[in-house]
Amino acid sequence: MDALTSAFVRVLRRQEEVERRLDRMEQAMGLASMAASAPEPPPPAPVEPAEPEIPAPPEAMPAIPPQAAASGETETPAPSEAAQPLFETRLGLTWINRIGAFTLVLFVGFFFKLAIDNEWIGEGGRVMLGVLAGSGALIAADRFWRAGQRVFAQGLSGAGVAILYLSFYASFGFYHLVPTWFAFALMVSATAMAGALALRYDSPAIAGLGLVGGYATPLLLSTGEDRPWAFFGYLLLLNLSGLAVARRRGWAIIEWLAFLCTSFLYVSWMDQRLRDATRFVATVFALLFYVLFASSALEILVLLAQIGAAFAMPAIWSYDAAPYALGSLAAAAGGMGIAGFRQWPRVAAATFAAFWLGFAIWKESAPSPVPEGQVFLSLLVAFALFSAWLPYRMLVAGTSPKYPDLVLAALNGVVFFGASYALLNRDHGAYMGLLAVAIAGVQAGTGYLLWDRTPEDRRDPRPVMLTLGVTLTLLVLAALVQFSGYRVTMAWAVELAAVAWIAARLDSRMGRAAALVLGVLVAGRLLVLDASIYSPDDYVAVLFNARFLTFAAAAAAYWLAAWCFRQGIAALPMFLAGHAALLGGLSLEVLHWSHRAAPQGELLGFQSTALSVLFAAYAVVSIAGGVVSRTAPNRIVGLALIAFVVVKLYVYDVWRQDTVYRVAAFGILAALLLLTSYLYSRYGSTLESIWKDRNPQA
C-alpha cells in the first residue's frame, strides 16, 4: 500500500509539472492570447494532492511468507521468527512433509509384508486395514486442507492414495479375493482419485507420491509369481492416469517420473521374466508404452522413448527375424511420423540412429543362418522411409533443412549399404556393387527432385550437394566392391569426369572439391597399384595393355575435368595431373620395352636415354599442340619438360652414360631443341598478337 500510494502521488505531481510546461510553451508561441479570447468554462478549483496517510511500520505487522500469502496457508512462523531464512520454512513445511508421507507408505507396505510372513491377520483383514488406512488419510487430508494447512494436506493425501494402490493391488494380484474385472475397476478408481486430488489441490506432489506408491506396489508385495498381462496392464493404467493429470497441468516432473519408473520396472521384468511364452506380451506393452511417452510434448522424452523402443525389439526377439523386423519398423515409422507432425528434425535423426543401432545389436545376437530375405526387406523399407524425410521437409513442409536433416540424408544410403553388405555379402557378393549403384541412383534422383521441384527463390544447394557427395561415395564403393585391380581406377576416372561436369553445371564449390578428392584417389591408385601391374619380365604389347589404358583413361578424365573447370582455379591441378598421368604411362611403357630391347649389361644407360628422348618428344608435341590450339599451358608444360631434359643431360647423362648413348641423347635433344626454336620463330608473332588481344592492358 505504501508503494502504491507513493506512486500515485508521483503521478499527480508529474502531471502538474507537465501542465505548467505546456502553459509556458503556449505563451512563448503566442498561443496564450488566442486561447484567452475564446470563451471557456470556469476552471475547477485546484485540488492539491493530499499526502498519503502513513501506515503503521512494517515491524508492527506479522511477517507472512509470500508462498503462504498466495495460497492462503496459515502455517506461518511466529512474528519473532520472521527473520528466519526461507529455506528453513521450505525444509520444515514442505520437504519434511513429503518425506514423512513417503515414509508412511513404506511403513504400511513393510507392515503388510511382515503380517503376511507371520500370518498375524487374514488376507481379507490385511486388505481392509489398508483400505481403511488410505481412506482415513484422505479424509484427514481434506479436513486439513479446509483448515488452511494445505502443504501438510498435500503430503497426507499422497500417502493415502499410495496406500490404496497397495491395498487394491494386493487384493487381486496376490490374494485373489476379487475377480479381475472388479480389481481393475478398483485400480481405475484409485488412479482417477489420485488425479482428481492432484487437480483439486493443484499439487504435483500428490500426483508424484501417488505414482511412486503405485510403482512401488509390485516390488513391495512380490511373491515371485509372474503374471505379465496383469502387471503391465496395471502399469499402463497407472501411466495413463498420471500422464493425463501431468499434461493437463503442465507438470513435466510427473512425466519424467512415469518414464523413469516404467523403464526401470520393464527392464527389471525382462531381465528376470522374459521367455518364449512372454515375448508377445513384452512386445505389445513395449509398443504401448512407446506410444504413451512418444506423445509427450517434451522433445527429449520423445527421443528417449524412441531409443528405448528401438533397443527393446532386438532384446525381445533376438532369435526371430520376422517379429523383430515388424516391431522395429513400427517404432521407426512412429518416430518419423511424430517428427514430421511436430517438425522435430532431431527426433527424426534419433529415430534413424536408434533403428540402425538396434539392427547392429540384433545382428550380433541373431543365430546363424539369418533369414536374409526377410531382414533385407525390412532394411529396404527402413531405407525408403528415411529417404523420404528430406523431400518431405523441403517439398511438403516447405522448411529449410536443419543440421539433423542433412546428417540423416548423408548417412542413410551409406549405412543401408553397409548393413546390407554385412548381411548379404557371404552368399550374394557378386551383386553388392550393383546394389551400391542402385542406392547411388536413388540418392542422385533425390537430389535432382529437390532441385527441380523447389522454387528458384527458395532453392538450397546444400541438400543437392550432399546427395551428390553421397552418390559419389557410393559409386566409389561400388567400384571397389564390384571390380578389382585397374578396373577400379578406370571406374573412378569415369566418376571424376562425371562429377566435374555436374559441379561445373551447378557452379558448386563442394562439387569441385569432390572432384579434386577423386583426382587424388585416382592418382594414388595409379602410383601405388596400377604402376606395378606387370613385372619387367612379363611380355605385353606396347601401348595396348591394361596398364597404359588405365593411365590414358585417367589422363583423359583429368583433362575433361580441367576443361569443365576452365573458368576456375581448380582447372590447373587437373590439367597438370592429366599430363603427369599420360607421361607416367608412357614412361612405364618405355621402361618395360627397354628391359627387353637393351643390350646385355647396358640397361641403365639405354633406359636413361630412352626416357630423355621420350620427355623431349613429349615436350615438342606439347609445344606444337599449344601453338596449334593457341593454349599457353600446353606450351609452358613443353618448355618445362625441355628444361628438365637439358638439366638431366648436362648433370647426369654426360657423366654416367657410355659414349654411344651420350651421342644419341645429345643428337636427338639438339634436333628437338632446334625444332622447338623453329616453332617459336615461325609462330612467335602470332602468339604475341593473341596474347595482346587477350590482355589489352599489358
Image: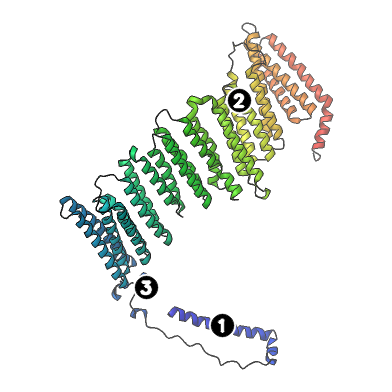
Numbered badge on residue 15? 1
Foreground residue, 95 or 328? 328
**Distance between mark 1 and mark 2 Cα atoms:** 88 Å
Looking at the image, is mark 2 or mark 3 earlier in the sequence? 3
Give the foreground label among 2 and 3: 3
Decide if residue 88 is in sight here: no
Foreground residue, 696 or 490? 490
User: What amino acid is at disc 1?
Assistant: Gln
Disc 2 is placed on an element classified as helix
Residue to which mark 2 is pinned:
489
User: What amino acid is at disc 2?
Assistant: Thr
Q: How is the image coloured?
A: rainbow
Looking at the image, is mark 1 or mark 3 earlier in the sequence? 1
Quarter of image, res 282: top left
User: What amino acid is at disc 3?
Assistant: Ala
Decide if residue 116 is in sight here: yes
